[in-house]
Amino acid sequence: MFVRILKKYFVCLVVIASLSLGLAQTPLSPEAQEVLQKGGQAAALALATYDEHFIDKPLWREAVNYGLELQKLAPDNPQTYRFLGQVYSSISFYSRAWEAWERYKRLGGVMNAQTAPYLERVSSWLGSKSFVEENYKDSILYYEALIELEPESEEANQHLALSHIALGQPQEATPYLTNLTQEFPNKADYINLLSRTEEQAKYGTEATEAFYSGIDLYSQGNKESALSAFDKASSLSSTYRKAFVWAGRVSEELAQPAKAINYWKQAVVLNETDEEAIQALELAQGQAEFGIDAYNNFKQGLKYYQQGMRGEAFWSIQRATQFNPNYADAYAWLGQISVENRDLNAALNFYSRAQQLEPSSTLFQSAYSETSRLLTQQVAASLPTPTPTTVAETQPRPQPEATTPPVNAAASVQPPSNPVTPTAEVTPPTPAAIAEPPVSAPTITETPISTPEITEIPKTPTPEPVAEVQPEVPAPVASSPLPTPNVVTPNAPIISASAAQPPTLTATPVPDPNIQAVAVTPKPPKPEPVPVAAGPAVTVLDINYEHQSPDAGGTGAFSFFDSPSSLLSNLKDPVDYVDGKLYQRINVSSKPSGEPVKYQVCLVHNDNLSIGPACSTNSTLQFEEPGVYEVSQALSTFSNFDKIDWTKGIQQVMLILQDKDGNTIDNRVAFTDNSGAVIDLNAYYPMKVKYSAILVPLGGTFPGWP
């Protein structure tokens, strides 16, 4: 069954109606004008005849041949290539269509609302095909043409960005990704891809790819390989801070604090205000010097001390000395806590151990001497329970120095039930002087002080450090750097020029960590339209007409009439006819049979080779028997309404006759009805009518029929 005539397939019908005008600046010769008219007629019949449009169809081949003949007669006239561009686009001969439209533009042809849709579809198809074939340079060529016509096209911006990325041109890709993030602020894929591309432009493609490979490996749980990838990224770019941060973090997770130090140092150099990185560096340095378990327990103890939990602090710091018996700072802190607990004997032993480990430390020497003096006074005063206070805080902080063989010194303390994670390092306080009570007893001989043994502490899980930077873990990076869009397969059935749609393309950008959505300033609301003055109604057509079969010398299903002079000017201003309503009335005086007829009116745009006329709905005006029929329809509901420049007016009025199924009633078009039977034209022709159409502007009043 052959195609029903569709409203959007009237491109070449407009050619028939308007070829005689030509472009004002480059008129065609009479011979060329005649060839162009014949070519347009062949194209119009092809659109009305075929449901699929290929160059091997006789009518399309005839239209192409007329176009090639026109090219010989007028090789430098833009009308020639506009006609060829539309014909080649209609039959999906995209490579030839591209050449025709490029020539049309070089000769001064304008891509407007009537011509742009053809080139948009051609550019989209060729660009998508080139992209899938990994011919990225050609893909850029075609999509640049598309984005010139449609700057906000998601397809064009996406594929231009991906093509430049594939060619190793991240800087060229960035503007298109910026457009996408602004147009689609909620699409995280575009935001992530923009961030990655900006990193490629800043740090180099190789370093960026190594970093994202590390992210992918880390997400898979392969930390060793991830660390190697982050190390490679940081070595390729000394300013790639994210690479250093991730390398430092993974090194810590792999219990390699010595290696983490170098990464954290560079991260701090690149951002000296990053407190988390600074704390992570201190943690790595402490773990490397004293051991991971010893340092973590020591830090945990300091956190307990800050919270006023001296018992838990003592236990955690004491545990640090079990992991590292040479931890001088830990012994010094045990001494301080013992002083605060009024256990001067234990405090003296802890300070003694700290002094042995770092004999050059004046802080430890001073703390030991002061504690010894206080203990002597306590014994001299025969105080059963000394009442120490804090030791003087005038001494500098104890510093770790050379170590000596370990000794045991401390009283047994029960571990806390809920240990917590240590925080940043706290400078250990220096024992302060204890208030000295009045002493009246005689001086006594100093008794040697025994060193208490450390009671075995029940083992508990080592608390985790908290100084570690915790950057957000991004989603795994897709293994393929480029998405594979859906395209129109070159060998697939070719669709019509008006029915074809651009291929749908789906990008698969790679996610990226630490990305913030781009803020988009909302577009200001469109101003309200200014009311225009109402004017008089215009009689579009008022004729007595007999529709005859083409065999009888008639016009068949298509009849053209010149529009009145009042419609050749601007239909929007000063009188707004565009937002008005068209009233139709038909008086059918004779008709061969009772077969239903759909009577359609089309307004032909006053522009050469326009995209198509604006047509009423074919079911609005229909009848079976002779009689009078009246209907009305808003002009804004006509097909192609928004694709016509109404400021140029209407050149012609076209009447179209269709059967009940929407098939054109014309013997120049070989067709059948929906049942497969050949339509009997004698059931429709001849048919005598009086047809009238009146266009009433916005705010106007229908004046009645003439």
Image (spheres, grey):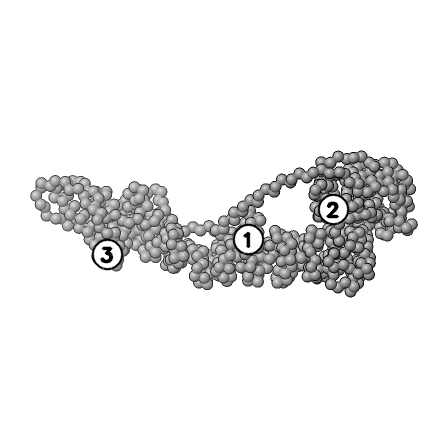
Measuring 57% from the left and 62% from the top, which residue is drawn there? 167
Horizontal and vertical percent position of residue 204: 49, 61
What's the residue type where badge 3 is placed? Glu
Res 65 quadrant in image: bottom right
Give the CA separation, mark 2 to mark 1.
42 Å
Please tell me the numbered disc located at residue 510: none
Q: Quadrant of residue 60?
A: bottom right
Q: CA distance from mark 3 to mark 1?
A: 60 Å
**Mark identifier at residue 358:** 3
Between 677 and 380, the one lying in front of the other is 677
Q: Are marks 2 and 3 in contact (CB under 8 Å)?
A: no
Residue 507 percent coordinates (x, y) = 59, 54
Identity of the amino acid at label 1? Thr
Q: Nearer the viewer, residue 8 or 701?
A: 701
Outermost residue on the left side: it is 442
Between marks 2 and 1 in the image, the one whose residue lies nearer the viewer: 2
Looking at the picture, which amino acid does disc 2 mark? Answer: Ser
Quadrant housing the C terminus = top right
Query: Gap between marks 2 and 3, in whole Å?
Result: 102 Å
Q: Does the rendering let one see residue 291?
A: no
Q: Which residue is mark 2?
A: 569
At label 3, counting other C-alpha atoms closer than 10 Å, the crowd grade (few under 14, some 14-19, many 20 or more) is many
User: Where is mark 1, residue-wise?
Assistant: 178
N-terminal of the two: label 3 or label 1? Answer: 1
110 up-or-down from 307: above or below: below
